[in-house]
Amino acid sequence: RKEVEQDPGPFNVPEGATVAFNCTYSNSASQSFFWYRQDCRKEPKLLMSVYSSGNEDGRFTAQLNRASQYISLLIRDSKLSDSATYLCVVNKRGTVSSNSGYALNFGKGTSLLVTP
Amino acid sequence: DGGITQSPKYLFRKEGQNVTLSCEQNLNHDAMYWYRQDPGQGLRLIYYSQIVNDFQKGDIAEGYSVSREKKESFPLTVTSAQKNPTAFYLCASSATGGGNQPQHFGDGTRLSIL
């Protein structure tokens, strides 16, 4: 099982739609979770951290399910400017076989295209 | 403005040549990281440093070297031993290296082979 798995998409949605992305992770010892956004040929930018109780930032809502090792991102009222790739990111803490025990694992990303 | 500066934006390497990518941050962050991203792929960790004068290999360190002589600087050298260096290289930093902090990225260097 890959350390962080995401549906690559692409997700094509009309403006104003609600869209949800899912992500699963394999390391049950992981403690920190993030969603990043990456525009084409640009660097990833932090969208939001994901907290155990779930959290919201404007039109974006993140949820964490530790029992199922599952993270979600919900985008409401999609805008054209939301078109990007969304990366699920999980910390590697507890991975005893890895030299990078304190770094982050990045999923390959889910591509979103919002159309007029 | 605080941030991470990578240079150059584009770099071309000849066969057998070593090249060095610059990464400087003025965020006063302890930890710095180098990633490589290939088209359609996720980020892969090359090296990371949790503190000055210390660094650790990541998942794909072969053919690369780093130094961390100053807190604000973490240059990456792509050596001639790296046989497939064409990629998008991203430098990042975080306040601490504990893995519970988000990382902030520079705008990257695109390296190609001539």
Image: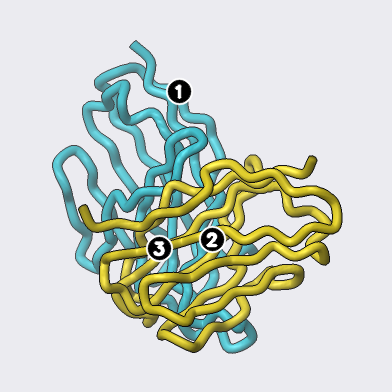
Chain colours: A cyan, B yellow
Report whether A87 appears left or right of B82: left
- On the question of residue A28 being in view, the answer is no
- On the question of residue B75 being in view, the answer is yes
Chain letter belonging to callout 3? B
Residue A13 location (% of width, % of height) = 39, 22
The disc placed on residue A12 is 1
Are the numbered discs 1 and 2 placed on the same chain, yes or no?
yes
Q: Is residue B106 above or below residue B112?
A: below
Q: Is residue A97 above or below residue A14?
A: below
Residue type marked 2: Val
Residue, disc 3: B24
Q: Residues within 10 Å of mark 1 (few under 14, many from 20)?
A: few
The single residue placed furthest to the top in the displayed view is A116
Residue A108 location (% of width, % of height) = 56, 49
Q: Residue visible at 39% across and 54% down?
A: B5
Chain letter belonging to callout 1? A
Q: Is residue B26 above or below residue B57?
A: above
Residue type marked 3: Glu
Q: Nearer the viewer, mark 1 or mark 3?
A: 3
Chain letter belonging to callout 2? A
Quarter of the figure with the N terminus of chain A: bottom right
Residue A59 location (% of width, % of height) = 19, 38
Out of A28 and B103, give the one closest to the viewer.
B103
Residue type marked 1: Asn
Residue, disc 2: A4
Are the numbered discs 1 and 3 placed on the same chain, yes or no?
no
